[in-house]
Image: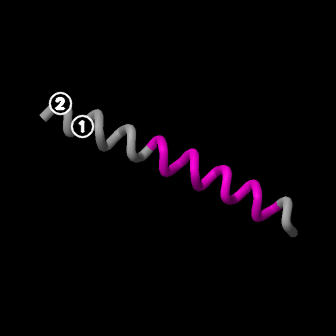
Amino acid sequence: MSKHDTDTSDQHAAKRRWLNAHEEGYHKAM
C-alpha cells in the first residue's frame, strides 16, 4: 500500500511538472 501511495505521488509530481512546462510554453507562444 505504501508503494502504491509513493507511485501515485510520483505520478502527480510528474504530471504537475509537465503541466507547468506545457503552460509556460503556451504563454511564451502567445
Numbered range of the magenta stretch: 13-27
What kind of secondary structure does the magenta stretch mostly adopt?
helix
Q: Residue at x 59, y 55 (%)?
A: 19
Q: Secondary structure at mark 2?
A: helix
Q: Is residue 19 above or below residue 13?
A: below
Amino acid type assigned to the residue bearing label 2 in the image: Ser
Q: CA distance from mark 2 to mark 1?
A: 5 Å
Q: Residue at x 20, y 39 (%)?
A: 4
Question: How many numbered marks appear?
Answer: 2
Q: Extreme top residue here?
A: 2
x and y percentages locating residue 24 in the rendered image: 75, 54
Q: Which of the labelled discs sits on residue 2, or is there none? A: 2
Could you tell me if the residues under marks 2 and 1 are in contact, i.e. CB atoms within 8 Å?
A: yes
Mark 2 nearby-residue class (10 Å; few <14, some 14–19, many ≥20):
few
Q: Is residue 24 left or right of residue 19?
A: right
Q: Residue at x 76, y 64 (%)?
A: 26
x and y percentages locating residue 7 in the rendered image: 29, 39
Q: Residue at x 87, y 69 (%)?
A: 30
Mark 1 nearby-residue class (10 Å; few <14, some 14–19, many ≥20):
few
- On whether residue 7 falls in the magenta region, the answer is no
Q: Is residue 12 left or right of residue 4?
A: right
Q: Secondary structure at mark 1?
A: helix
